Amino acid sequence: MTNVTPFRNVKHASMLWASPDRAEEIAALHAKLFSPAWDAAAIQSFLEHPAATSLIAVAGGQKKTVIGFLIGQLAADEAEILSIGVSPDWQRVGLATGLLEGLTRAARRGDAKRIFLEVAEDNTAGLALYRKLGFTEAGRRKRYYERPGSAAVDALTLVLDLDLPNQAG
């Protein structure tokens, strides 16, 4: 694996559409970030779905390494973010914002009126990012996220209304 840590500058990363042939790399990063993690077959299935609207961030030398991903889908007039993650070495440099803005532009081009996502209520960094980009709380799922060895955590359903001015993207 190429070591991409020294740069840690969003200018050294590229945003690309996520294709099914990158499922293994995305799954490896997903496993570093989430428990339980999605396997490559599940990710490939999401990426092959006709509604898939997914992005990756890559960096490195000749062989670009996946350092971030956003798995989403667009159906009718709504978009949904199923999962988003950034390599720990690349967090807090703007990659998640770039991925979210990319999906927002794609959703607008697809005539979506809103984007939905779910986030654990204790994910303070994620909540801060989503609120900064204009997402608001639309609902709650009690004890949605199971945590090995600890109590389950509520999921907050957030929505970004794309008809409002000054929204992400």
Image (tube, rainbow, N blue to C red):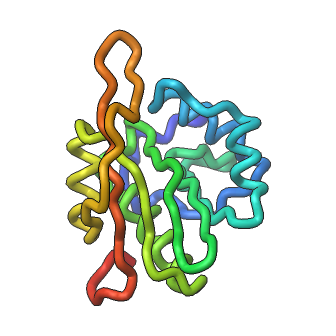
> For the C terminus, which image quadrant?
bottom left
At which x and y percent is residue 57?
Answer: 53, 55
Give the vertical position of 118 relative to 89 (above or below): below
Given residues 59 and 139, the one toward you in this image is 139
- Image position, residue 100 (x, y; %): 43, 64
State which quadrant residue 14 falls in: bottom right
> Camera-side residue: 99 or 67?
99
Measured as percent of width and height from the top left, residue 76 is found at 62, 77
The residue depicted at 63 percent of the width and 65 percent of the height is 53
Q: Quadrant of the N terminus?
A: top right
Task: Give the number of marks.
Answer: 0
Camera-side residue of 132 and 65: 132
Report the side of 97 relative to 18 (left or right).
left
Say which residue appears at 67% left-offset and 49% top-offset: 62
Identify the residue at image location x=53%, y=51%.
Answer: 82
- Residue at point 56% right, 29% down? 37
Say left or right for 1 vs 155.
Answer: right
In the rendered image, the vertical position of residue 19 relative to residue 7, given as above or below: below
From the viewer's perspective, is residue 60 above or below residue 72? above
